Amino acid sequence: MMEYSTYGRHVAMDAWGIAFEHLNAADLLSQQMVQAAEASGATILSVQAQQFEPQGATVLVMLSESHMSIHTYPEKGFAALDCYTCGDTVDPHVAIQAMLVFLQPQETAEVKITRGMGELVISRFPLANREECDSPIPASVLGRERGEGTVKP
């Protein structure tokens, strides 16, 4: 029997001000999610996508290392992104950043959670550095405060 670490990293991001057409195309979002997962070094097991009527989409990417998801509200210009990876070989932040290159939101807020170590270590902050996305940080994001906290089980 193999011993596995329970260590994992979880990134959740809310993104606003995204073009309707980027959020209302489950097939396109699926392609982008696969590319983002691959960019992070994750191993893709399966992809499930659902296009909703009159608008909206959900895409779930099952990874060998865990999962990645997006839920969209095109009429609001909003997407909720999520990536959780077990271990330390795949960085979920890289996958989320890759999605931001495609989505080009006007504003974002991000939470990073360290999991599986006996307590949840939560870092809350807006996306602080978009240089790796080749786009400027929205002024509305720069005005938000950073904070960190720890939640014990």
Image (spheres, grey):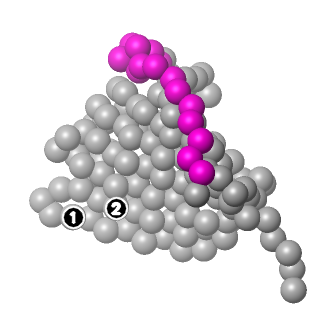
In the displayed structure image, the side of residue 106 where residue 30 appears, left or right: right
Residue ID for mark 1: 52
At which x and y percent is residue 31?
47, 57
Determine which residue is flagged by label 2.
58
Task: Depth check: give the residue in front, 103 or 4.
Answer: 4
Q: Which residues are magenta?
A: 137-152
Q: Amino acid at mark 1?
A: Phe
Does the magenta portion include 128?
no
Q: Which one is nearer the viewer's eye here, 120 or 152?
A: 152
* SS under mark 2: strand
Measured as percent of width and height from the top left, residue 77 is found at 25, 39
Q: Is residue 62 visible?
A: yes
In the image, is residue 96 above or below residue 71?
above
From this view, report whether residue 120 is shown above or below residue 87.
above
The outermost residue toward the bottom is 1
Q: Which mark is residue 72?
A: none
Q: On the rendered image, what quadrant is the N terminus found in?
A: bottom right
What amino acid is found at the position of numbered circle 2 in the picture? Thr
When asked about the image quadrant of residue 20, the answer is top left
Q: Are marks 2 and 1 in contact (CB under 8 Å)?
A: yes
Q: Is residue 144 magenta?
A: yes
Q: Earlier in the sequence, mark 2 or mark 1?
A: 1
Q: What SS does tag 1 mark? A: loop
Residue 113 in sight: no
- Percent coordinates x, y for residue 72 in the rendering: 30, 51
- Percent across and percent down for residue 152 are 60, 51
Residue drawn where x is 31% and y is 68% of the image: 50
**Residue at (21%, 64%) from the top-left corner?**
52
Is 13 positioned to the left or the right of 44 in the image?
Answer: left
